Amino acid sequence: MSERKPKFALFGNIYQARKSASIQKVLACLSDCGAELYVDMEYYYFLKDTQHLDVRATGTFVGQSFDADFVISMGGDGTFLKAASRVREKGVPIIGINMGRLGFLSNVSPDDIEGYLTAIVRGDYVVDDRALIQVQTSGGDHFEAFNCALNDVAILKRDTASMISIRVSVDGQYLNTYQADGLVVSTPTGSTAYSLSNGGPIIVPGTNVFSMTAVAPHSLNVRPIVLADSSVIELEVESRSHNFLVAIDGRSEKCREGTRLTLRRAPYTIKVLKRPDQHYFDTLRDKMLWGADQR
């Protein structure tokens, strides 16, 4: 009996036209490995019509309508997050090839593509399970298409004039009312993103916690807080404009004042694929430039 060919689903950033050399490496390597390749339709036509590449794909797909053993994200961390929102509860491991700048999630260098993909095809990899935050709203679900965040959920003021008031309860117990430009609730995966830029802590993936960090708080006494990811966080927002923004992994939607938000750990995880010799602390030192100052 012949061995089944591995199936790959390919997502990519259609705004990075200068990076066609890397996608050619991916296409050639998967062809050499005898893998089946299914490409997100929008990205497929970008490669064919804009990049003028010969994309020999097994097929294309739209939305979540794909069946694959692995997902490849070609882009930066933003592209990875979009791919994760399409994978959702499928449980398909995601490989992030970094075509952007920082790349905590998309941490495979274009120079490592061939060796990385070849190792994956032969089974030389490990999988990290990453927790997500699920968002529910009172009076209907505002976020049916993307109600879970791999990085963070940010509650933000919508106008530029004044701060908002965010009343926070944890497991039914009142915690604090934040007077601030916003509040970021982050997973460990997202702790090096928007939360970090607002003074939040770096949290190692696999740690079963969420962090909560205010954005430009009115009081200097306000500090980030770390909560067990089994917690249920309830938020009520007041605003002079009577509305506010909720951003789930950067994709925002307007909510009206009085909307109650409930945040909890999602019932599924996102699987991030890596080589056995890849370690988070190595990535952290590299991306944060720790030790780069030789004074």
Image: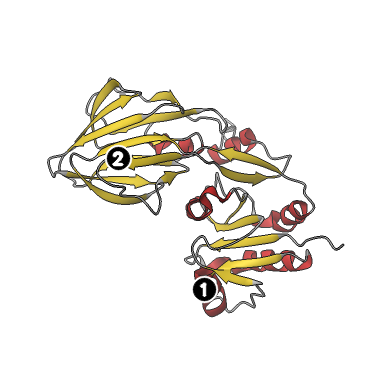
Left or right, 119 with reference to 76: right
Q: Quadrant of the C terminus?
A: top right
Residue shown at 66% from the left, 42% from the top = 127
Residue 242 visible, this angle: yes
Instruction: Give the answer, above or below, for where 199 lies relative to 8.
Output: above
Residue to which mark 1 is pinned: 46
Callout 2: SS: strand
Q: Quadrant of the N terminus?
A: bottom right
Residue shown at 56% from the left, 75% from the top = 51
Pointer 2 local density, CA inside 10 Å: few below 14, some 14–19, many at least 20: many
Callout 1: SS: helix
Residue in the foreground of this view, choosing between 270 and 75:
270
What number of labels is visible? 2
Q: Position of residue 286 (x, y in %)?
A: 60, 39
Residue in the foreground of this view, choosing between 284 and 266:
266
Left or right, 288 with reference to 242: right
- Amino acid type at mark 1: Phe
> Which mark is drawn over residue 253?
none
Left or right, 202 with reference to 2: left
Instruction: Give the answer, above or below, for where 271 lies relative to 23.
Output: above
Residue 200 visible, this angle: no
Residue to which mark 2 is pinned: 155
Residue shown at 55% from the left, 61% from the top = 11
Residue in the foreground of this view, choosing between 245 and 283:
245
Residue that sits furthest to the right in the current view: 1
Instruction: Give the answer, above or below, for where 261 lies relative to 174.
Output: below
Left or right, 209 with reference to 291: left
